[in-house]
C-alpha cells in the first residue's frame, strides 16, 4: 500500500471520528463514505437504504462480501486526541470509524486490481450495528443476493496491534434483553402488612436469577444473566406499587436460549406469587450468536498468518454482533484485530491504534481475492 493511501485512510478515519452519528442517523457519514467511494471510481449499488452504502468491484459470477459498520454511540468523548468528536455526547467509542476506513482501504486496493479479480467483491458499509437493526435492513434490501461468503471485523482493544483472533463455530453470543415488572400493593412504609412489598420481591428475584446460570445449566455452558436497571419507589415512607427490572441474557447454545425465557418466567412467577404479588416478563430477542463457518475461519487464520499477523487464541465472547445475521444466510467468518486501546470498547476514553488500519485493509483485500480464487462457480 502506498504511503499516500495509508495517510488517506487515517485522515478519513479521523474525519469520521470528528463527526460521529448515532444508529440510523448516519446521514452525513453515509454522504462522506459515498463521496470517498466515488473518488475511488466506485458507484453505489441502487439498494433502497435510509443510511449506509454498498459498492461492488469486479466482474463475473463469483461474489464475496466484506462488511464494515459505520455508527457511533451516545457517549461524551474524553480521549485526548486532536480529532476528538465535534458532536456533543456522540462518539465513535466502538471503533466503527476504524472499521469503515479499513474497508475503504480494501475497496481502494481491490479497485486497483479490478481487471484481474476472478469475481466480484461487494462491500457493505452498514448502519445501526449498535442497535442491532442495520444488518437486517441490508439483508432485507437484498445485499446478500449472489454472495457466496462474507467477512467482517471488529477491533479488539485488549489485543496488541498486529494480532488477529477468530474461531470456527460460536464466537459472539446470543443477545436477549428483558424487562421484569413486579407488581405489589402500595402501602405506608410503617404498615407493610397492608401492602405487598414489590421492592422485597424484586430483590429476591435479582438474587434468584443468578441461580439460573449456576444451578439450572451445566457449568460447562456459557450463560450470563445481568440485571442492569432497577426502578421503583418515589420516597422514603411509601412502599411502591411496582418495581421494574431490566437486563440482558447472553448464551451461545441455542437450546438454552430457547428455554431460558420460560425458566425466568417460572422463577419470577413463583417468587412473586409466594409473597402475594405478581411478576411479568417482557422479552426482546436481540441478534443470534455469531457462528463462524469453520472452513472460512481457518481460511481467514491461514491468510492472516501468511501476511504477518500474529494469531491469538480467543474464547467465545459474551458480547453481541449483528454480523451474525449475515451468517444465517451465507457462510463466512468474523475476525478480531488488535487495536491496543487502554480504555475498552464503549469507554469515553477509547482510543484505538490507527496503525492497524493499513494492514487490515490489505488483509481484507487479499482475503476477498483469495476467497474468490478458492470458490467454485455458483450453481
Ligand atoms: Ni462495535
Image (cartoon, rainbow, N blue to C red):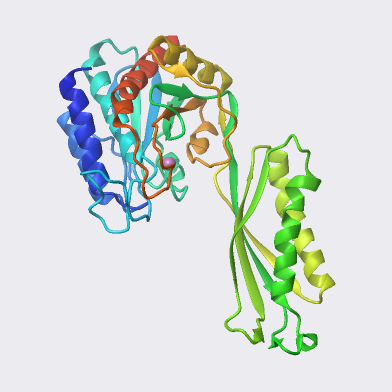
Please tell me which residue is depicted at 75% across the width and 63% down the height of the picture: 268
Q: Identify the residue at horizontal 77%, vertical 52% (top origin).
A: 211
Nearer to us in this view, 307 or 345: 345
The correct choice, above or below, for 214 with respect to 371 in the image is: below
Quadrant housing residue 38: top left
Q: Percent from the top left, x then y, of residue 239?
A: 68, 83
Answer with the quadrant where ligand 1 appears in the image: top left
Q: Is residue 104 left or right of residue 8?
A: right
**Residue 235 sits above or below residue 127 on the image:** below
Left or right of residue 334, residue 3 in this image: left
Specify the quadrant that holds the N terminus.
top left
Q: Indicate the position of residue 248 as horizontal and vertical percent values.
A: 60, 53
Toward which corner of the image does residue 15 lie, by quadrant?
A: top left
Is residue 122 visible in this depiction of the protein?
yes
| Residue under the point 18% across and 38% down | 35
Residue closest to the eye, 5 or 308? 308
Q: Please state the horizontal and vertical placement of residue 233, each as a whole percent of the image.
A: 61, 79
Instruction: From the top left corner, tell me how far across and down residue 170 is, in percent.
Output: 60, 31
Q: Is residue 60 left or right of residue 300?
A: left
Amino acid at each position: 500500500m502506498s504511503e499516500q493511501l495509508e495517510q488517506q485512510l487515517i485522515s478519513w478515519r479521523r474525519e469520521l471520528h470528528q463527526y460521529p452519528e448515532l444508529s440510523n442517523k448516519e446521514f452525513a457519514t453515509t454522504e462522506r463514505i459515498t463521496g470517498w467511494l466515488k473518488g475511488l471510481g466506485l458507484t453505489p449499488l441502487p439498494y433502497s437504504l435510509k443510511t449506509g452504502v454498498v459498492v461492488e468491484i469486479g466482474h463475473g459470477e463469483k461474489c464475496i462480501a466484506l462488511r464494515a459498520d459505520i455508527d457511533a454511540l451516545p457517549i461524551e468523548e474524553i480521549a485526548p486526541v486532536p480529532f476528538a468528536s465535534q458532536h456533543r455526547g456522540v462518539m465513535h467509542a466502538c471503533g466503527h470509524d476504524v472499521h469503515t476506513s479499513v474497508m475503504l482501504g480494501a475497496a481502494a486496493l481491490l479497485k486497483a486490481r479490478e481487471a484481474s479479480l476472478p469475481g466480484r467483491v461487494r462491500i457493505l458499509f452498514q448502519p445501526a450495528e449498535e442497535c442491532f437493526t442495520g444488518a437486517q435492513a441490508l439483508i432485507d434490501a437484498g445485499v446478500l443476493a449472489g454472495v457466496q461468503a462474507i467477512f467482517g471485523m471488529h477491533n479488539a482493544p485488549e489485543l496488541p496491534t498486529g494480532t488477529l483472533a477468530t474461531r470456527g463455530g460460536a464466537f459472539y453470543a446470543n443477545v436477549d434483553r428483558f424487562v421484569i415488572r413486579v407488581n405489589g400493593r402500595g402501602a405506608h412504609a410503617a404498615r407493610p402488612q397492608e401492602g405487598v412489598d414489590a421492592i422485597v420481591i424484586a430483590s429476591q428475584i435479582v438474587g434468584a436469577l443468578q441461580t439460573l446460570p449456576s444451578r439450572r445449566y451445566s457449568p460447562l455452558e456459557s450463560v450470563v444473566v445481568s440485571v442492569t436497571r432497577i426502578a421503583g419507589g418515589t420516597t422514603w415512607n411509601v412502599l411502591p406499587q411496582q418495581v421494574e427490572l431490566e437486563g440482558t441474557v447472553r448464551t451461545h447454545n441455542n437450546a438454552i436460549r430457547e428455554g431460558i425465557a420460560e425458566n425466568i418466567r417460572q422463577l419470577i412467577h413463583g417468587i412473586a406469587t409466594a409473597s402475594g404479588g405478581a411478576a411479568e416478563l417482557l422479552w426482546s430477542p436481540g441478534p443470534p450468536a455469531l457462528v463462524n463457518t469453520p472452513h472460512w475461519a481457518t481460511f481467514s487464520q491461514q491468510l492472516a498468518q501468511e501476511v504477518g499477523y500474529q494469531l491469538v487464541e480467543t474464547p467465545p465472547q459474551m458480547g453481541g454482533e449483528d454480523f451474525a445475521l449475515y451468517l444465517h444466510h451465507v457462510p463466512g467468518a468474523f475476525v478480531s484485530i488488535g487495536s491496543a486501546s487502554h480504555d475498552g470498547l464503549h469507554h469515553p476514553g477509547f482510543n484505538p491504534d490507527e496503525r492497524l488500519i493499513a494492514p487490515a485493509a490489505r488483509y481484507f483485500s487479499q482475503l476477498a481475492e483469495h476467497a474468490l480464487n478458492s470458490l467454485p462457480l455458483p450453481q
